[in-house]
Structures are given as C-alpha cells and as structure tokens.
C-alpha cells in the first residue's frame, strides 16, 4: 500500500517576502540618497553663484591681491567649481562636512554644539502645537457651524497669516518692551548667569537636576516667547487639517452605520471617526517637526537663540559656504527621515496602505 505523501511547507514564500521587503527597503534608501545628493549638489552650486564672495568678508578692506589669493587658497576656493565639488563630495563621503569660515571649527562640531539649544526650543513647541492643533480641530468639527467653530477658524486663519518672525517681534514689543514681564532676545539665559552643568543639553532640565531652581526658572522664562511663536506656526495648519478630516469622517457611511447599530457615541468618535480623521494629521505633524528643527531660522534670529537656525542665518550673512551646506544637508536628512517615519505611521494606522 502506497502511503500518502504529505507536502511539507517550503521556505520559498518566506524567502520571497523577505526579498520583496529588502527590495522595497533598497528602493526607498536609494531614493532617499538620491534626494539628499540632489539637495547637496543644488546647494553647492547656488551658494557659489548667488552668495557674495566670502573673501571680501574675511580679509581687511585694504588687503592686496596676494593676501586675498592666499586666503582663497587656504579656504579651498582657488580651484574650479567642478574640482571644488569633487573635493567636497570626497570629504562628505568620509563624514567631513568641512570647516566653517566663521568659527574655524568643523561644521559637524558646530551643528552638534548648537543642536541641544534647538532641541530645547523645538520639543515644547511641538508638544503644545500638536496637542493644541489636534484638540482645536476636533472641537471645531464636533461644533461645526457653531460659535466655537467660527472662533477657532478665525484664530487659525490669523495664525496662518502672521509670519513667525513678525509675530516674534510683536510679542517682544508687547511683553518685553511695553509690559516688561518677560525677558528680551538674549538667548538661553540672561547675561551674567552661568549655564548649569551639562547633563541633557537642556538648561531647564540640567538646572533642575543640579538642584538650581533659580537658573531653571530663568531658562524657562527665556523659552516662553520663542516657544509660543513656534507653537503658533505648528498648531494652525494641524487645526485646519484635523477639522477637515474629522468633518469628513463624521459624514462617512461607516460612522452612520456604527451609530445606527447603537454603539456608544464616545466609541464611535474614538474607534471609527477619530482614527481615520487623524491620518492626514500625521503628515502635518511631520511638517511641524521639520519646521521646528529646520525652518525656525528667523525665529532663532529674532530671539538671539543660539541654535542651528541662528547658525544658518549667520552663515548666510557671512557667505560661510561649508556652514550653509552643512545646515542644508542636516535639513535634508531631517526631512527624508521624517517622511520615512510618516510612511511607517500610515501603515500602522491604516492597514490598507501596507499593500
């Protein structure tokens, strides 16, 4: 009697899935590297064509041709643009972003030194902006057509219409110049106050960990106005998108069906309407993160905040090519990483996108 042969599961489907995932990851990584390379190349060419010659800013006005040529050679600006570009890519491949003309320090070290200041400013602004924008958008959708909805829409449009640097100047004029209740644009701490011992990079947290509540209070006071300006730029677009998404979700057939089946109103809102309404908000949150970490150049400049944004602003003013290229590379990496995380967040929130 011939026995029945049972087919054993093969590893081919698992191997095929693994190969497909690896191929997809490779494509995304290749696309990300291509975007970064394009941004780096465009920035390299533009700063050398549009920006003023940095030699005129680095040498005395009466310096002779020999001095100017010597400085140009020292900075690596004596060759053709093609040769400079090749040298720059070679250094970049080794992780060398160049040396800043202004600080005479490696650009990577400058960015790392200034990142804690940007982080201390960005994190509370993001928390406030995302929470306020999402909450106001949901409230406006639930009160659609009522007084609360109209008031929130007016505030949102006003926030969108105000440039961040202008809002910062107006807040300084009101709370620092006129009322005198908040500190001026003097950085992370008042003049003459020593920073706390570095543990986290945040002056507020480091001072609290060191038991210095007075310095922590001074550092927190310096954060109030710039955080308010950044949060204003973050919450307004999130509010509009959250309201639109929630209104559309509340009108959908699946919400009507869940309501008709007698599900509790709270469960219908949270399990059905809110989850689908927040999908477009994910993209706006990513935009807010990018704005807080890379786009707040003028905000940091207005408040004298010694972060990466002010570093980029000074680099533009001084035609500091390596510093400006380093900032743009940093911004490009931030955007690429953020939108990769957005893809993952969409896949987690909406199973339909996983295919």
Image (spheres, rainbow, N blue to C red):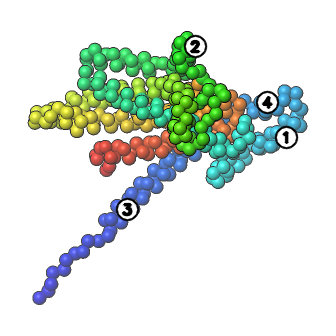
Say what secondary structure mark 2 lies in.
helix
> Residue 56: which numbered mark, if any?
4
> Residue 25: which numbered mark, if any?
none
Q: Eyeballing the image, is 268 above or below 350?
A: above
Image quarter for residue 3? bottom left
Cα–Cα span, label 4 and label 2: 37 Å
> Residue 18: which numbered mark, if any?
3
- Density class for disc 3 (Cα within 10 Å; few <14, some 14-19, many ≥20) is few
- Density class for disc 4 (Cα within 10 Å; few <14, some 14-19, many ≥20) is few
- Density class for disc 1 (Cα within 10 Å; few <14, some 14-19, many ≥20) is few
- Density class for disc 2 (Cα within 10 Å; few <14, some 14-19, many ≥20) is some
Cα–Cα span, label 2 and label 3: 62 Å
Earlier in the chain: of badge 2 and badge 1, it is 1
Q: Eyeballing the image, is 160 above or below 249?
A: above
Q: Residue at x 32, y 70 (%)?
A: 11
The residue wearing badge 1 is 70
Q: Position of residue 249 (x, y in %)?
A: 24, 32
Q: Residue at x 31, y 65 (%)?
A: 13
Image quarter for residue 184? top right
The residue wearing badge 2 is 177
Q: Position of residue 224 (x, y in %)?
A: 50, 25
Say what secondary structure mark 3 lies in.
helix
Q: Is residue 97 shown left or right of residue 117?
A: right
Q: Nearer the viewer, residue 190 or 249?
A: 190
Q: Position of residue 130 (x, y in %)?
A: 39, 32
Earlier in the chain: of badge 2 and badge 3, it is 3
State yes or no: discs 3 and 1 in contact (Cβ < 8 Å): no
Cα–Cα span, label 3 and label 1: 56 Å
Residue 26 visible in the displayed image: yes
Say what secondary structure mark 4 lies in.
helix
Earlier in the chain: of badge 1 and badge 4, it is 4
Residue 301 visible in the displayed image: no
């Amino acid at each position: 009697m011939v026995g029945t042969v049972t087919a054993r599961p093969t590893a081919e489907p698992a191997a095929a899935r693994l190969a497909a995932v690896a191929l997809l990851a490779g494509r995304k990584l290749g696309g990300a590297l291509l975007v970064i390379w394009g941004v780096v190349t465009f920035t390299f060419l533009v700063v050398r064509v549009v920006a003023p010659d940095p030699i005129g800013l680095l040498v005395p006005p009466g310096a002779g041709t020999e001095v100017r040529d010597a400085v140009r050679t020292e900075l690596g600006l004596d060759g053709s643009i093609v040769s400079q570009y090749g040298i720059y890519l070679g250094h970049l491949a080794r992780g060398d972003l160049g040396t800043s003309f202004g600080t005479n320090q490696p650009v990577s070290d400058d960015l790392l030194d200034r990142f804690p200041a940007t982080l201390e400013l960005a994190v509370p602004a993001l928390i406030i902006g995302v929470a306020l924008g999402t909450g106001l958008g949901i409230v406006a959708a639930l009160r659609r057509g009522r007084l609360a909805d109209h008031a929130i829409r007016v505030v949102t449009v006003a926030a969108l219409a105000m440039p961040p640097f202008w809002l910062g100047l107006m807040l300084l004029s009101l709370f620092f110049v006129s009322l005198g209740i908040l500190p001026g644009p003097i950085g992370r701490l008042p003049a003459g106050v020593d920073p706390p011992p570095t543990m986290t990079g945040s002056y507020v947290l480091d001072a609290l960990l060191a038991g210095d509540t007075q310095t922590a209070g001074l550092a927190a006071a310096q954060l109030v106005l710039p955080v308010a300006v950044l949060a204003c730029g973050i919450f307004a677009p999130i509010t509009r998108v959250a309201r639109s998404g929630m209104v559309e979700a509340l009108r959908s057939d699946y919400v009507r069906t869940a309501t008709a089946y007698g599900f509790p109103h709270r469960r219908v809102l949270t399990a059905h309407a809110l989850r689908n309404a927040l999908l477009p908000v994910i993209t706006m949150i990513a935009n807010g993160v990018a704005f807080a970490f890379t786009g707040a150049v003028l905000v940091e400049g207005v408040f004298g905040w010694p972060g990466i944004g002010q570093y980029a602003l000074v680099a533009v003013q001084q035609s500091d090519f390596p510093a400006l290229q380093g900032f743009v590379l940093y911004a490009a990496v931030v955007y690429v990483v953020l939108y990769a995380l957005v893809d993952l967040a969409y896949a987690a929130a909406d199973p339909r996108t996983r295919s």
